[in-house]
Image (cartoon, rainbow, N blue to C red):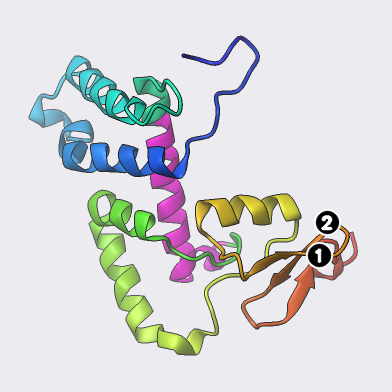
Amino acid sequence: MAAASGERAPAFTAQELEKLVDGVLPQYTLLYSPPDQQVSAHQKRDIWRAIAKEVRTLGAHQRRGTPCRKRWEDIRCCSKKTAEAQMGMASQRGRGARRTMTPLMFRILASAYPELDGRLRASQQTQGASSGGGTVAPKHKRAASHMALEGHITDSEYTSGTEGEGSFTSATGSPTSDTDSSADGGL
């Protein structure tokens, strides 16, 4: 069932995301086929409805085809950005910090962006363990908890402080606080 007017739909659970990816990957070539393959919008809509039906079998929430499609596009984009950050491409364009790739992200990259997946795996092999880690501490507690839920940082990298403030371990191993303002020049 959709959320009432003015309410947000509940976030996808980890099991729903797994089921979504399991449903999309075998159908990926049909859903994102070039125009010359003649897959109609109606056929694609039916595929998304079938995927949503599979996600609904988990019983957590009543998902429809369009929200499933939008969530897939979101995690596909997030996977690509994370892979680019892992390879250092994003830092060249001034984007954010490095994040850790999850197994789910690797599965998405392998089907959606095979050339990027190959370059990422090659760069990880050449960098090895000499890079000093793959995550950078987020500045705020909310961002850290979101990253922990999505699998970007581990529980050992995010620990709660004595007064509810989160503390993080940066890629260099030094602890930082989510209230530390030295990273942004004290602003």
Residue type of the residue flagged with mark 2: Gly
The rendered magenta stretch, by its main secondary structure, is classed as helix
Q: Quadrant of residue 123?
A: bottom left
Tell whether label 2 touches label 1 (CB within 8 Å): yes
Quadrant, the C terminus: bottom right
Of the pair 184 and 166, the residue shown nearer to us = 166
Residue at the outermost top position: 5
Q: How many marks?
A: 2
Q: Which residue is at a point 27% across and 20% down the rendered structure image?
A: 49
Q: Which residue is at a point 53% across and 34% down the rendered structure image?
A: 11
- Element under label 1? loop
Where does label 1 land, which residue? Answer: 161
Residue type of the residue flagged with mark 1: Gly
> Is 37 drawn above or below residue 136 in the view shown?
above
Of the pair 8 and 33, the residue shown nearer to us = 8
86 sits to left or right of 132: left
Residue 177 lies, in percent from the top left, at 80, 67
- Element under label 2? loop
Residue 98 lies, in percent from the top left, at 55, 67
Q: Quadrant of residue 109?
A: bottom left
Bin the neighbour count of mark 1 within 10 Å (Cα to Cα): few under 14, some 14-19, many 20 and up: few
Of the pair 181 and 36, the residue shown nearer to us = 181
Residue 48 lies, in percent from the top left, at 27, 25
Marking on residue 82? none
Magenta residues, as a range? 70-93
> Is 3 drawn above or below residue 76 in the view shown?
above
3D distance between C-alphas at marks 1 and 2:
5 Å
Of the pair 74 and 5, the residue shown nearer to us = 5
In the image, residue 91 lies in the stretch drawn in magenta: yes
Residue at the outermost left position: 37
Bin the neighbour count of mark 2 within 10 Å (Cα to Cα): few under 14, some 14-19, many 20 and up: few
Where does label 2 land, which residue? Answer: 164
